[in-house]
């Protein structure tokens, strides 16, 4: 089976101009399987929208090749550039882009009415539109003016419209960012369900790491126009390949240190840090003397009052601040001149108390600089 999308070395660079520092995307490469939900995640300006627009055919890349469903749609070297409407895509953007002068039904039916790749009969248009409105839960609103829908409903309508023609690829650029926090969480569950049910391959753009972790099959983390890491949500969270990815996805404690002896990929070794010697896991082979950052996630540190015999890495510290979060407590602990964030379920430790911080070598990941 061919891949749903192949992006090869796609580059689109904008020169710096008045008021803009320039940027774009540089040599982005990734392959997406049929039915996958693939997310481009990264801070503002890292090149997510540029990448998506290149896939859509809204930008002409300076370099590279793009293949959709086995068919080449762009190749800089040969000059091949298939037009946007022939790429058979569905798109949803941040702004709803609902046509206010049309009913809900007419909005969803529009792509079928104007399709240039295939003619649809009236009956087909009615059936397909009703089907897709049913899918997004808007059947009851079909005859209403689109402007009478709430923000969440308008975004659902935008999705219905994007899905009406059963596109080869669904491209979504921050589709939920105009919604309030609660609705956003609700909609991301719904969006994931819809994507699963329809089996459509999707490229999803967001700068929200929690959203990316929750809905993606795989994530590409981007930084300054380049892809920093590609992996499943758990791989990205548990085994980031850099300080940047560790900090951008989830919360991190990072300690600078130096490796005391050589280590092979997947093994643990001693790292000398300001907080003493720590046993750390290495995702890559490294030589003695290498500068590393040790990553420990806040939920992987156990906090205790007692000085009982602990195994693993153990530090003595003092609680600077405790924050009650409802489902957990977050402690800020000063240990060996460093401040650690610790997430814990147990209560009963107060600010000013002396504590031990314990974490296994398995949860102390050494990242090369
Ligand atoms: N048409 C353009 N002309 C000049 N520079 C541009 C143009 N479009 C994008 N850029 C620059 O390219 C870089 C990447 O922009 P892009 O819109 O792809 O970022 P993004 O990751 O989508 O960011 P955001 O999260 O803010 O939407 C930015 O520095 C931006 O200023
Ligand atoms: Mg963008």
Image (spheres, helix red, strand yellow):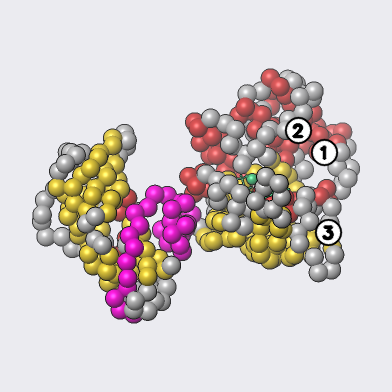
Left or right relative to 84: residue 278: left
Is the C terminus in the top left, top right, bottom left or bottom right quadrant? bottom left
Left or right relative to 344: residue 292: right
Q: Which mark is residue 108?
A: 2
| Residue 92 visible somewhere in the drawing | yes
Residue at figure coordinates x 75%, y 39% from the top left = 164
Give the SS element for disc 3: strand
Residue at figure coordinates x 75%, y 65% from the top left = 63
| Residue 3 visible somewhere in the drawing | no
Residue at figure coordinates x 47%, y 57% from the top left = 244
Residue that label 1 marks: 112
Q: Is mark 3 within 8 Å of ligand 1?
A: no
Give the class, few, some or many, for how many residues have Cα within 10 Å of label 3's Cα (few <14, many ≥20): some
Give the SS element for disc 1: helix
- Range shown magenta: 233-262
Left or right relative to 331: residue 177: right
Instruction: Return the disc, 3 or 1, that comes first in the chain's sequence.
Output: 3
Residue that label 3 marks: 81
Residue at figure coordinates x 67%, y 34% from the top left = 95
């Amino acid at each position: 089976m061919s891949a749903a999308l192949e992006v090869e070395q796609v580059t689109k660079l904008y020169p710096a101009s008045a008021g803009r520092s320039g940027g774009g995307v540089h040599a982005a490469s990734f392959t997406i399987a049929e039915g996958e939900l693939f997310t481009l995640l990264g801070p503002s300006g890292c090149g997510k929208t540029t990448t998506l627009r290149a896939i859509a055919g809204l930008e002409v890349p300076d370099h590279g090749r793009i293949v959709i469903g086995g068919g080449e749609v762009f190749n800089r070297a040969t000059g091949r550039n298939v037009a946007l409407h022939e790429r058979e895509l569905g798109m949803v953007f941040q702004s709803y882009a609902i046509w206010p002068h049309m009913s809900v039904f007419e909005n969803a039916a529009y792509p079928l009415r104007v399709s240039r790749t295939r003619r649809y009969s009236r009956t087909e248009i009615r059936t397909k539109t009703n089907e897709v409105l049913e899918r997004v839960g808007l059947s009851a609103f079909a005859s209403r003016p689109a402007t009478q829908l709430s923000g969440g409903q308008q975004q659902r309508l935008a999705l219905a419209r994007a899905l009406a023609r059963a596109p080869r690829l669904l491209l979504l650029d921050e589709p939920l960012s105009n919604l309030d926090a609660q609705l956003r969480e609700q909609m991301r569950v719904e969006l994931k369900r819809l994507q699963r049910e329809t089996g459509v391959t999707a490229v999803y753009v967001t700068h929200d790491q929690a959203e990316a972790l929750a809905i993606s099959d795989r994530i590409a983390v981007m930084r300054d126009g380049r892809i920093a890491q590609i992996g499943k949500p758990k791989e990205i969270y548990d085994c980031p390949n850099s300080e940047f990815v560790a900090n951008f996805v989830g919360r991190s404690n990072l300690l600078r240190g130096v490796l005391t002896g050589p280590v092979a990929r997947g093994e643990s070794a001693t790292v000398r840090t300001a907080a003493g010697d720590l046993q750390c896991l290495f995702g890559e082979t490294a030589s003695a003397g290498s500068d590393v950052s040790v990553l420990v996630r806040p939920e992987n540190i156990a906090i205790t009052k007692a000085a009982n015999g602990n195994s693993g890495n153990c530090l003595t510290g003092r609680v600077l601040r405790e924050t009650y979060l409802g489902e957990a407590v977050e402690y800020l602990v000063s240990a060996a001149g460093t401040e650690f964030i610790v997430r814990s379920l147990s209560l009963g430790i107060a600010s000013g108390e002396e504590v031990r911080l314990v974490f296994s070598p398995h949860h102390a990941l050494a990242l090369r600089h």
